[in-house]
Amino acid sequence: MKLFVDTGSIKDIEALAVLGILDGVTTNPSLLAKESGDYRQNLKRICDIVKGPVSGEVTATDFAGMMRQGHDIAEIDEHMVVKVPLTRDGIRACKALSTEGLRVNVTLVFSAAQALLAAKVGAAFVSPFVGRLDDVATNGMDLIREIVTIYDNYEFATEVLVASCRHPIHVVEAARMGADIATCPPAVIDQLFNHPLTAIGLEKFLKDWEKSQVAAKV
Ligand code: G3P
């Protein structure tokens, strides 16, 4: 399963990219609004660092505006993916942009029916928001299972990009279900590394080694 980071922070992206675990980046208007500088330049910088799919979202809500902004986003870099919301205009824009050969990520997906529509219009990625479903007492991961089944049934090429991941269990369950990608905030990626037994084990190895080196010198 591919791992994307869900952030607009170049500092965080640089820190993760050097680890070799990053396959791509997702952004949204809320994330980019937190960063200083020109958002197009920031997205270009992100593409230069990661060299994988980088989603940039349109803010227009009408078809013509989405097309205009979609072209503008795609021009930033060959790695850019145009993100559109799951609305009627978004689905129409996805069809038109995908037909032109651009990659589209359909976002704000909260049902299997919506995911089916995104696949039918050739979305490269579909972004179901698992954490936000959990927030309203609905199991977000159940939706991932449904989408993976539906896409497998019809061999849709659309990749299932599990978004709004809030903790490592979301990531592990996504992998167990066969989702293509999980996109996580940097803090959740940090949590993937952590296990108390790793820290305790390493501390003991190093202490034992240090003791043996002292003993060897006596
Ligand atoms: O980028 C889309 C999605 O991952 C947002 O997550 O945590 O704001 O629900 P969150």
Image (spheres, helix red, strand yellow):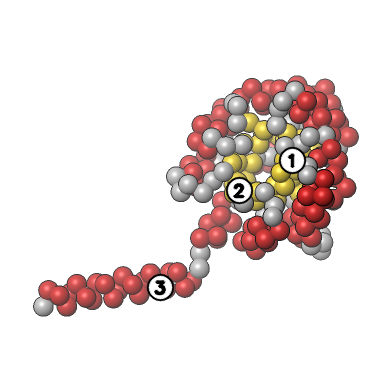
User: Residue 211 versus residue 43: which sits nearer the camera?
Assistant: 211
User: Residue 144 versus residue 210: which sits nearer the camera?
Assistant: 144
What residue is at 36 percent from the left and 71 percent from the top?
Answer: 203
Residue 133 appears in the rendering: no
Q: Is residue 201 above or below residue 57?
A: below
Residue type, mark 1 in image? Ala
User: Residue 41 versus residue 82: which sits nearer the camera?
Assistant: 82
Quadrant in the picture for the C terminus: bottom left
Q: Earlier in the sequence, mark 3 or mark 1?
A: 1
Instruction: From the viewer's perspective, tell me whether residue 21 is left or right of residue 150.
Output: left
Q: Is residue 80 above or below residue 206?
A: above
Instruction: From the viewer's perspective, tell me whether residue 163 is left or right of residue 44.
Output: right
Nearer the viewer's eye, disc 2 or disc 3? 2
For mark 3, give the secondary structure: helix
The image position of residue 156, as x and y in percent, is: 78, 42
What residue is at 55 percent from the left and 33 percent from the top?
Answer: 47
Q: Is residue 93 above or below residue 3?
A: above
- Answer whether labels 2 and 3 touch (C-beta < 8 Å): no
Which residue is denoted by mark 3 in the rendering? 201
The image position of residue 97, as x and y in percent, is: 76, 26
Which residue is denoted by mark 1 in the rendering? 157
Is the CB of the residue bearing disc 3 within 8 angstroms of ligand 1?
no
Q: How much space separates mark 3 and mark 1, taking CA atoms?
A: 43 Å
The tag on residue 2 is: 2
